[in-house]
Each structure stands twice: as C-alpha cells, then as structure tokens.
Image: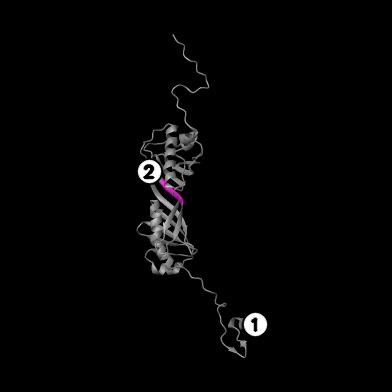
Amino acid sequence: MAALPQQSSLDPPQGFEETSPELLAAEPKNSHAPSLAGSVIECHDEVGDRTLLIRIQNIASTANLGVRLDLKKIALKCRNTEFNPRRFGAVIMRLREPRATALIFASGKICVTGVKSTHNATLACKKFHYIIERVGFKPKEYMDFKVQNIVGTADLGFPIRLEGLLYAHSVFCSYEPELFPGLIYRLVNPRVVFLIFVSGKIVITGAKKEADLSLALTKLYPVLLEFKKVHTASTFDSIAPASQGNGKVIRSAAEKRMEEV
C-alpha cells in the first residue's frame, strides 16, 4: 500500500483555495457599517438655480417587538442602560455605532432617536432587536418599523422680513416674538412645519420621509425670497445738505440738537 504524502501544519488543508490579497482588500470588513448617506440632502431652487443643503439633525422612529419584556432583567444584563421605574417606566439603552438611543417599554414597543439617516435608524433597530433576543426573549422578526419624525435645518443665506410674511400668509403662519423669536409656518402638502428666523436660518420638522424635506423647501423658497430683507443706510448717514450758500453747508438738525445740549 502506497504511503500518503505527509502534510505540514503550515500548509493549507486539501481543497482550500487561496484568496488573493486584492480580493481580500475589495471585500468590505463590515457590510452593515453605519452610513452618513442621507444626513445631508440637496434641494434645488427652481427660481435662482441655487442648491440648498438640508442637514438632518434627528430622526425619531418606532418599532414593535411583539413580546412582553422584563425591563429589570434587561437593565441588569445589558450595558449602557438606565432604568429608574420611579422616574420613567422604560429602559434607556444607548448604542455607539450607530450613535442612537432607544426607549424600551415593557409592552415590547421601542422608540429610537438620535440617528441622522434612515439607514442608521433601521440598523439601530436591528441591533436593539438582536440585543433583546440575546437576553432571552423571543421577539418577532417583523418589527413594524416606522419613521415618525425627521428634523432638518438649512440656511437661506439672507435675512427675512417676518412681519411681512405673517401679513401676507396669515392663514399658515403664527408669530409671537414675545414668546418665541421664530415664525411658525405650517405647510399643507407635504405636511411639515417650518420654524423661520430673521437671520435666514430655518428648521423643518414633521416630515415622514427625507424627500419631503427637499420638496417642502423647494415650494417655500420662492415665498421666502419674496420677503428678503434689503439693507438700507441709516437715517443720519443719508441726510444730505439742505442747501448751499456762500460755500457753506447748513448743518443737520441732529448736530444742532447736540450743540444745544
């Protein structure tokens, strides 16, 4: 009987195909890596052919695990959790990647906040689902994930006359400068709310989809451009000499008033 060739411990096993370094470099290390895609949305202006950037600041989403949970057990077995039933009847759990915070209730419902893209929102829900499953519970596969609110900010680059905007669009606006410095503009379609400030900075909230932010700003931008504040020179700088005689200029009323004092 012929002897089989001896195989060294350093040699690869039979049937093993070596992978080239190029293929290894091409393969992603983590296919579920957090992504910032969607955290900045471009909005094209049809009037002035200008591109505005909307930065997503927060996305609030909900999910339902479909099983009753023992919150005390979750708080004891999981890291980065807070549970004080006397103050709030939910476990506060935090993730580092993606950076997210979840409110986990005993009914099995979860509220996830702190993410800045819908990709990271779904990824965070999947990670919370996995953590709850590792603790010992059996949540259902379909979590009924829904995005409830998206908050974005933008800078128009010019100041706005809020009083004029309120007078012309009083049906959709509310403005109480003594209570809040921003004008509240409620758009009907898409159903979002704008917080508009004199400086030209705006906050968009109430959107369910990222595309709603871009569509809403595209509709409202021509209206805001109409009420753009134009800088005018001060009154005293624009006072011209009333008349000239014998090479002397008549002084303004303000200067005479100062001399009398």
Residues 96 and 140: in front is 96
Measured Cα–Cα span from mark 1 to mark 2: 74 Å
206 or 221: nearer the viewer: 221
The span shown in magenta is 57-63
Q: Is residue 166 above or below residue 55?
A: below
| Number of the label disc, if any, that sits on residue 134 | none
Q: Is residue 31 above or below residue 194?
A: above
Q: Is residue 80 magenta?
A: no
Please count the marks in the image.
2
Q: Which residue is mark 1?
A: 259
Which structural element holds mark 2? loop
Q: Residue at x 45, y 43 (%)?
A: 102
Res 62 → quadrant: top left
Q: Which residue is mark 2?
A: 145
Quick one: label 1 or label 2, which is nearer the N terminus? 2
Q: Give the residue furthest to the front.
A: 2
Q: Is residue 172 visible?
A: yes
Question: Residue 49 at what x, y percent from top left?
Answer: 42, 62
Quarter of the image holding residue 130?
top left
Q: Is residue 220 above or below residue 137?
A: below
Type of amino acid at the residue the image marks with label 2: Phe
Element under disc 1: helix
Q: Position of residue 65 (x, y in %)?
A: 38, 38
Q: Position of residue 123 (x, y in %)?
A: 43, 41
Our reading of the magenta stretch's main secondary structure is: strand
Residue appearing at x 38%, y 53% in the figure: 211
Pointers 1 and 2 in contact (CB under 8 A)?
A: no
- Give the amino acid at mark 1: Glu
Q: Residues within 10 Å of mark 2 (few under 14, many from 20)?
A: some
Q: Position of residue 241 (x, y in %)?
A: 57, 84
Please tell me which residue is depicted at 39% across the width and 42% down the height of the picture.
63
Which residue ends up furthest to the top in the rendered image?
1
